[in-house]
Image (cartoon, grey):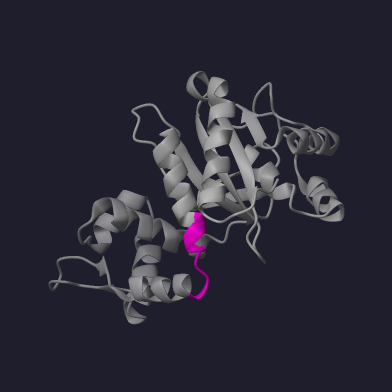
Amino acid sequence: MLVKQAANVLELLEYFARRRRPATLAEISDDLAWPRSSTFNLVGTLAERGYLYEPRLRAGYYPTQRWHSVLHDIGGADPLPDEVVDLANAVAAETRETTAIATPNGLHAMFVHVVESDQPIRYSVQVGGRVPIHASSAGRALLAQMTADERQAIYRRIKWMRFSDTTPLSGEVIEAELTAADRRGYHQSNAEYIADLAGLAFALPVPHRRLSLVVAGPVSRCLSRRVEIAGAIRRGLVRHGLSIAG
């Protein structure tokens, strides 16, 4: 379910992140295709609460540092463990592929830390990006950390859409893949949700958190490197004091 007012606040923040300079009410309304009245009400509310201001009179609005302060306090109360962030950074440097940390988000795996590859052709994703929990190696590495009852509850809610010829279409198929991954030592995917994208993931053994680490990139480059990438992740887990899970 999408709450329009909340979505508009986020869209406005992303707009300013792209624009990187003040915008007038008319510019915001035109650029985002919003009604002038809705733009006036939203901008007025955020300005009243101290989240937008006019750097120069009648020259447009811009976000204040209050956003940064609030987000800093939120992040400081529940940060990712340093060893997990360091692991992702080290694996990305060794494999030169996009490396991310994911956590469950309803029927999705959501990325909470991303290190993009420096290669011209790469998997491009941002923090907050999501992939289906059942149709991704990152997601199945999270499902593997759940109880059988928790997984069945998720399967009952999934709309089994076919994104590609390799998309899993039932809970039985997922359970079989989890068993295969346990024998293999890692979770893998091949263009199940995004065309030409291969992924390889491990569950991360962090107390009271469900996290996975995934390395993803073009099929043409990553399928043949699965054993190599898995080895890089295993070495990283050892170096950063994390036992292997999933």
Q: Is residue 41 magenta?
A: no
* Residue 96 in the figure: left or right of residue 27: right
Q: Residue at x 69, y 24 (%)?
A: 166
Q: Viewer-proximal residue, 106 or 209? A: 209
Residue 13 visible in image: yes
- Which of the image's four quarters has the N terminus? bottom right
Residue 194 on image: x %, y %: 56, 30
Residue 136 sits above or below residue 28 on the image: above
Residue 147: x percent and y percent?
82, 55
- Tell me if residue 125 can be seen: no
Kindly identify the residue that appears in the image at 48 percent across and 21 percent down. Answer: 221
Q: How many marks?
A: 0
Q: Is residue 126 left or right of residue 198?
A: left
Asked if residue 88 is positioned above or below residue 206 in the image, the reply reads above
Locate residue 127, reporting x and y percent. 46, 52
At horizontal 58% and vertical 27% (from top left) the residue drawn is: 226
* Location of residue 246 (image quadrant): top right
Q: Is residue 133 left or right of residue 52?
A: right
134 in relation to 17, above or below: above
Residue in the foreground of this view, choosing between 159 and 237: 237
Q: Inspect the magenta stretch and tell me whether residue 83 lies in it.
A: yes
Which range of residues does the magenta coloring cover? 77-84
Locate residue 67 relative to residue 140 in the image: left or right.
left
Percent coordinates x, y for residue 138 in the rendering: 62, 43
Residue in the picture at 52% in, 25% down:
222
The quarter holding residue 211 reads bottom right
Q: Which sits in the foreground, 171 or 114? A: 114
Q: Is residue 30 above or below residue 125?
A: below
